Amino acid sequence: MSQVLDEIEACVPALRRYARALTHDPDRADDLVQDCLERAIRKRRLWRPTGSVRSWVFRILVNVHRNELRRLRRSLTPISLEILPGGDPAGPDVQPDRLALAETVRAMQALPAEQREVLLLVGVEEMSYAEAATVLSIPVGTLMSRLARARAALRSLTDTGVPKLRSVK
Amino acid sequence: MSRDHHKITEYDLHAYADGALDGPARAAVQAHLAENPAATKDVDGWKRQNETLRALYGHVAADPMPPRLSVYRIERKIRTRASHWGRMAAAAILLIATGAAVGWYGHGMFAPVPPARIGLVDEAMEAHRIYSSEVAHPVEVWAGEKDHLQAWLSKRLARPLNVPDLRADGLALVGGRLLPAQGGPAAQFMYEDDTGHRVTLYIIPAKEGREISFRYAKLDRLEAFFWTDEAISCALVGDLPRARLQEIASRAYKQLG
């Protein structure tokens, strides 16, 4: 049993990252993760190793977040730029400038939640399409069309003539 | 598996941008992109989106972890909570001894109860039978001296005892007494409702220091819920309906714990 706990524990950093990207609010994000972990831990005896622990806990997180959205009825929170990473972001060969990052944050907040969900699972969590589809409980085909729509929407929301990211490599 | 002769779909392009293709499939898309600047622009755009999103959110995973998100801490919290509230529900482990003591011991076979526990319930029921019918001297120390009663029995059992307040269950404290039990002292607190029904709470120091969840036993008309926490083993005895007795036991448990 504690092996499952260990596997859940190993997912916590990624769950926080995903929750933060979904909500753009550190406290709310950690609340969601905590809620998710409590559910997962309580239900861990029901979990059967048909998929990965990761896709299972992510599915719980997605559901917790959707429930919350339903409750909040998507009250539009003012855009916070606190999300922006401080000094230098991760990759040495990618240095999107702060303006572009801020623009993307705005765009992400404007995306429908279901598009944000898929874009982040694939783009940030780097899940395979099959795993992301499992997390979202949808067929891979649905996932693909949702991903395509999300990318098009993000692009149209950021393609407004303001400075672009420097190209890669 | 060669994709050379297949039409490259938009989904292939996404898969390529996400690094999900390898081998011939990847090569096929690369060949396609070489001839399609528009598609190349799309794919580059998607890659940049991924990179921007990672730059935006990637750092969160490396943030210091707040203790409240510790899996083991949450697990402990759930376990503690469960032992507080779930025990009563967990009284599904019902040890119902039908008839006399033979039945009682017999049932221990399929729901093993440590011998000490049987002693506890037997003694608690016996003490209940003897003292709850007493009119003049049901207790040694009356409720009027509750503080003294609590201090005295805590000292004799070498455990801090908090005499539960069961007025919310319609039970007033009558008082308590010290009793001899197997190998040591026992405390008995007596309560009474407005119809004169008496309920007793029988407490001995826990020996093995192992928590035991709520169990239920019935003997003649008497019913008992018994449990063990870190410090004490308790049995609540009365001739009340089981559900009511269970409510009372749960309240007593919370206050004693």
Image (cartoon, coloured by chain):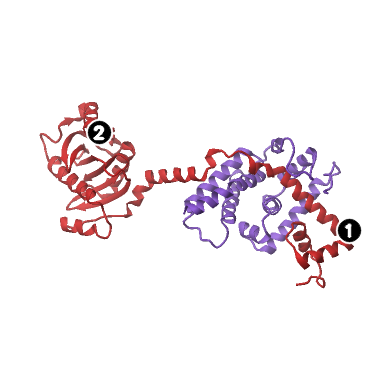
Chain colours: A purple, B red
Image point (18%, 42%), residue name: B183
Q: Chain of mark 2?
A: B
Name the residue nearer the viewer: B172 or A122: A122
Indicate which label's residue lies in the foreground, 2 or 1. Answer: 2
Name the residue nearer the viewer: B24 or A144: B24
Image point (77%, 57%), residue name: B17
Residue B69's x, y, as percent?
A: 54, 42
Q: Against A114, is B135 above or below? A: above
How many C-alpha atoms fall within 10 Å of the one at disc 1: few (<14), some, or many (≥20)?
A: few
Q: Against A122, is A91 above or below? A: above
Q: Quadrant of the C terminus of chain B?
A: top left
Residue B131's x, y, as percent?
A: 14, 40
Q: Is residue A62 left or right of residue A107?
A: left
Image point (79%, 70%), residue name: B3
Q: Against A20, is A130 above or below? A: below
How many C-alpha atoms fall within 10 Å of the one at disc 2: few (<14), some, or many (≥20)?
A: few
Q: Is residue A69 visible?
A: no
Q: Which residue is mark 1?
A: B37
Q: Amino acid at mark 2?
A: Ala
Secondary structure of the residue carrying tag 1 is helix
Q: Amino acid at mark 1?
A: Pro
Q: Is residue A128 left or right of residue B123?
A: right
Q: Which residue is farthest left?
A: B136
Secondary structure of the residue carrying tag 2 is loop
Q: Which residue is mark 2?
A: B158
Task: Tell me which corner region of the image, top left, top right, bottom left or bottom right, holds residue B99.
Answer: bottom left
Name the residue nearer the viewer: B101 or A112: B101
Q: Is residue B155 left or right of residue A89?
A: left
Q: Earlier in the sequence, mark 2 or mark 1?
A: 1
Q: Against B161, is B127 above or below? A: below
